Image: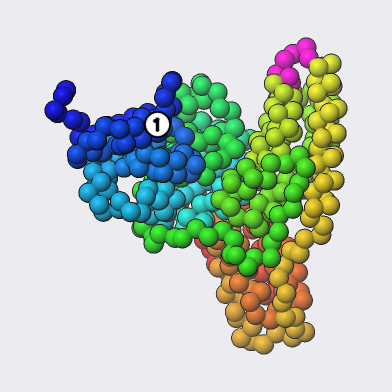
Amino acid sequence: MSGSPFDLVVVDYMMPEMDGITVAAKIRSELDLNPPPVIIMATAYGSEAVVKRAMKQAQIDGLLIKPINQGLLFEAIMEAFGRAKGADAEKGLGIKGNFSQALSGAKVLLVEDNEINRQVACELMQQMNITVLVAENGRQALDLVACEVLDGVLMDMQMPVMDGLTATRMLRQDSRFKDLPILAMTANAMAGDRDLCLAAGMQDHIAKPIDPDVMFATMARWIKPASPGPSVVINPEPENSTVVLPRIEGIDTRSGLARMGGNIKGYRNLLLGFRENQASFEEKWRQALAEDDREAARRIAHTLKGVAGTVGADLLHQMAGELESAIKEPSADEHIKRLLTPLLEEMSRLFQTLDQAFPAPDCIPEVTMVDKETPEMVHRRNTLLVQAAKQIAFYDTAAENTLAAIWEHPVAENVADWVKMLEKLVAKYDFENAMEAMERCSKALGFELEEK
């Protein structure tokens, strides 16, 4: 091949002896090619650290996230040749910016039964200007897909009522949804999981705990907004933010914060939610065993494993995983007892540490309270409550922002009590109980809810 250098090099990142970044760097620095080839790096690891290293050491022209298909390869080549010609040469890959540009304005349904996982995924997507609807099981997902125009679905595999695989198969039987992007989300990173997802009709697989870069890379591969929105600049926490994250022994706050896209306040709320939601773990576990419901016990351990991994409680994550594996064995009662004791001790220690780190958080901002509302005040809060009711009816997380807007003006004490209750339910993505509360609120405050 002397005298006929390649115009394009596609190099894998993970290889024995020499990784793709090193190969690309040597091509750039040692071969003295003029013009140099366009270099695209293929990787299953779309983390920001990998991208920064690739740009700094090798000045690669494009990144290709696996699994790769013909269309993705073509798009990556076209973009890389355009970048090499100088269109974006000085800007680098800007991986988060590219995701924002690709996904802003998308309308996505998140199907996830776990509150902590819902909170993480919702907050990450909202940072990207993605509208998020939420379902807690496959049956709710079918109902929402039937009445909403969506750009994509993120579907958990293991859920009560109806699991994600069953829901996906049913959607694919309807010709209206044969091309709807459906991406699996699962905490079980076993080799067979991806095959099961593809066989059910899903296009791809996102592992939990969520890696934001990998999640957005996977979403951008399949989801194309019908009404694209403007790119957003991700600045999770202003420099003058008063939110402080203390050191918490037993929790890798660095990795946990990374899963929240650097949003300190969001991660703090995530830790508080973990503390509250898992407080009943022992009670639920012992009840499941008392009823000889080993599948329920397995799900309880599986949930703990997932949320512990998400917040960065690595030891608890490992312990819960061992407990989940043990409960599957028919004659492992003594082993389960030996695993349970240190797990409960670790949970208790973590909870005490979290209680010390985050004493009595403020739940609502300062507001002006009034004894009597003016007609203008009544009209304004009713308008916002009706809007929030519509959003709650469709499991739309934007209801949180609508309710928050009520605090921007003076409110009466009885109104404040209802809004606090609704905010607490919506913050937990408990939309069914939130809708019931909204119906009671409308009767108590004397306003009509519009039919959805």
Magenta stretch, overall SS: loop
Q: Amino acid at mark 1?
A: Thr
- Return the x and y of residue 108 as percentages of the image width and height: 47, 49
Task: Say which quadrant the N terminus sits in.
Answer: top left
In the rendered image, the vertical position of residue 398 relative to residue 374, given as above or below: above
Q: Nearer the viewer, residue 40 or 22?
A: 22
- Return the x and y of residue 315 as percentages of the image width and height: 73, 32
Span highlighted in magenta in the image: 326-332
Residue furthest top as drawn: 331
Horizontally, residue 202 falls left or right of residue 133, namely left
Verify whether residue 329 appears in magenta: yes
Residue 296: in sight, yes or no? no
Residue 165: in sight, yes or no? yes
Identify the residue position indicated by label 1 in the image.
22
- Return the x and y of residue 274 as percentages of the image width and height: 73, 45
Q: Quadrant of residue 329?
A: top right
Horizontally, residue 46 falls left or right of residue 319, namely left
